[in-house]
Amino acid sequence: MSSSTKSSANANSGSETIDFGFREVPESEKQKLVHDVFEQVASRYDLMNDLLSGGLHRAWKQAMIDQVNPPRNDRAFAHIDVAGGTGDVAFRCLDRAGAGTHVTVCDINAHMLGVGKARAEAQAHQGRVEFTCGDAETLPFPDRSFDAYTIAFGIRNVTHRDRALKEAYRVLKPGGHFLCLEFSQVVVPGLDDIYNAYSFAAAPRIGQMVTGDGAPYQYLVESIRRFPDQPTFAQMITDAGFARVSYRNFTGGIAALHSGWRL
């Protein structure tokens, strides 16, 4: 098992290094490298998740919204979706929620946010969703601002995941719910070999054919393998201060939904 925060001293430069897929890069460079990946795939981000999940990400996200459980009446409910620039999770929440629910989408990539804003206009969600450019490690919001925090397929791309988890705790109100949907470690014997063969061999090639560039898909597949397993990540959530931490595997552990509460 590899650690998501694996770092070592670089003998030549003295700087810290961190994983970027299977590569080790200077810690200070990871954010830009990840930014460049998502600049390339922003307009086809949902298609990218289709390739990586075989289309199952849609059902997994709906299961996450089931856990958010926004009120269907006029009761005020503040939901933040981090690293969700295209608005997919936000719109799913609004389609389910009543008039009192407001969603804030926070993403570090302005191009991704532009896609989300255009979709919000097309789907008539203006006024119930706002888009903010910000870093998951230093969210630009006051303490205790939100009733629910979600992040789907984003936290594995954060440079310091422990900081992002502490920020999630900070911006949640007491009683607030943290939910993280992420590709994870397959727990069904045999399925891991099938999924590895598909993701490493097929997904980058399909990405090359569909988008003209397979490199972003190669990174994303590698980043999944470097992400901590379910119990390890659950402990990280606990260490950030959350209570009643649990996780639920989807499709044999291809993805997992992690849950925690600020009490």
Image: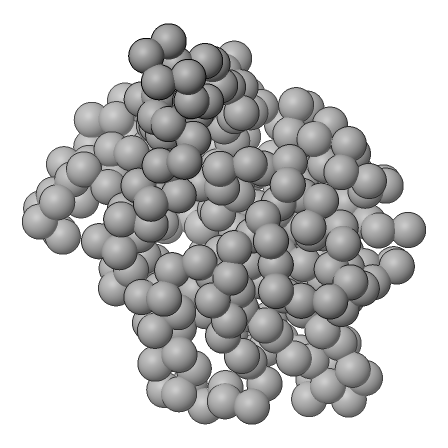
The x, y position of residue 23, in whole percent, is 31, 22
In the picture, measured across the screen, residue 41 lies left or right of residue 18, that is: left
Q: Is residue 61 visible?
A: no
Q: How many marks?
A: 0
Q: Nearer the viewer, residue 12 or 147?
A: 12
The x, y position of residue 186, in whole percent, is 50, 24
In the picture, measured across the screen, residue 173 lies left or right of residue 122, that is: right
Residue at point 39%, 43% (across, down)? 31
Q: Dividing the picture into quarters, in which one does residue 191 lie?
A: top left
Residue at point 25%, 64% (across, down)? 43
> Residue 65, relative to residue 160: is it above or below?
below
> Residue 157, relative to residue 118: is it above or below?
above
In the picture, measured across the screen, residue 8 lies left or right of residue 55, that is: right
Q: Dividing the picture into quarters, in which one does residue 52 lie?
A: top left
In the picture, measured across the screen, residue 208 lies left or right of residue 234, that is: left
The x, y position of residue 235, in whole percent, is 73, 27
> Residue 206, relative to residue 127: is it above or below?
above
